[in-house]
Image (tube, rainbow, N blue to C red):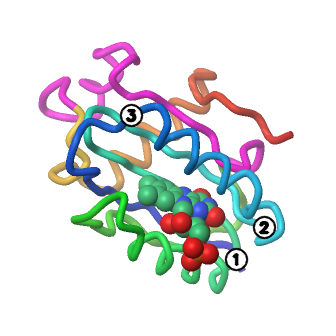
Amino acid sequence: MLVHLLYASRAGAAIDPGTIESILRASRTRNPALGITGVLCHAGDVFMQLLEGGRAPVNELYNAIVRDPRHREVMLLHYREVSERSFGGWTMGQVRLDRINPSLLLKYSETPKFDPFSAPGEASMALLCELVATAQVVGRAG
Ligand SMILES: Cc1cc2nc3c(=O)[nH]c(=O)nc-3n(C[C@H](O)[C@H](O)[C@H](O)COP(=O)(O)O)c2cc1C
């Protein structure tokens, strides 16, 4: 059984490239053995990550991520069983949401500012699917 789990969190200060690099390195090392794929988005001090895979490994990883001191205010945005993967090409893809066209953010929210804490989870999922469809996710599976 496959599930999608989407959450948002805050880093406390602007996220620096070193932090992203170390998170992505851990993800790309560990996620393949767990059968987990997904996307990590960030803008300013906000993370939004979609984890996709078996129910048990996704929940286990989510619990580890919630305890990670590099972020706080972890908020579950969306969780559901799915029949197929949407992000199977990425052990953990990356999107800098402060670099994408504001009109894409506007398509799914009231303002062009990225705020997953107030947006409906379904809207954030739709945004992620559009980022995949328009090839804006970087870091293919190795
Ligand atoms: C925003 C964020 C996303 C993360 N995503 C992943 C991930 O996809 N896979 C992973 O193995 N670790 C990820 N981590 C790192 C984990 O929180 C944790 O440090 C890592 O799994 C090692 O856990 P351990 O020290 O309990 O063994 C992420 C951390 C943060 C802050």
Report, in whole angstroms, how far the alpha carbon at label 3 lies from the one at label 2.
28 Å
Q: Which numbered dot is residue 121?
A: none
Image spot of residue 114 (x, y percent): 24, 34
Q: Earlier in the sequence, mark 2 or mark 1?
A: 2
Count of all numbered marks drawn on residues in the image: 3
Q: Identify which residue is drawn at 66% across, 56% down.
A: 26
Q: Which of marks 1 and 3 is nearer the N terminus?
A: 3
**Is residue 104 part of the magenta span, yes or no?**
yes
Residue 2 visible, this angle: yes
Report the mark closest to the observer, 3 or 2: 3
Q: Residue 99: say if magenta.
A: yes
* Mark 3 or mark 2: whose residue is earlier in sequence: 3
Task: State which region is magenta.
Answer: 87-113
Classify 118 as above or below 33.
above
Circle 2: residue type: Gly
Amino acid type shown at disc 3: Asp
Residue at the location (21% across, 50% down)? Answer: 12
Which residue position is annotated with label 3?
16
- Residue at image position (21%, 35%) is 109
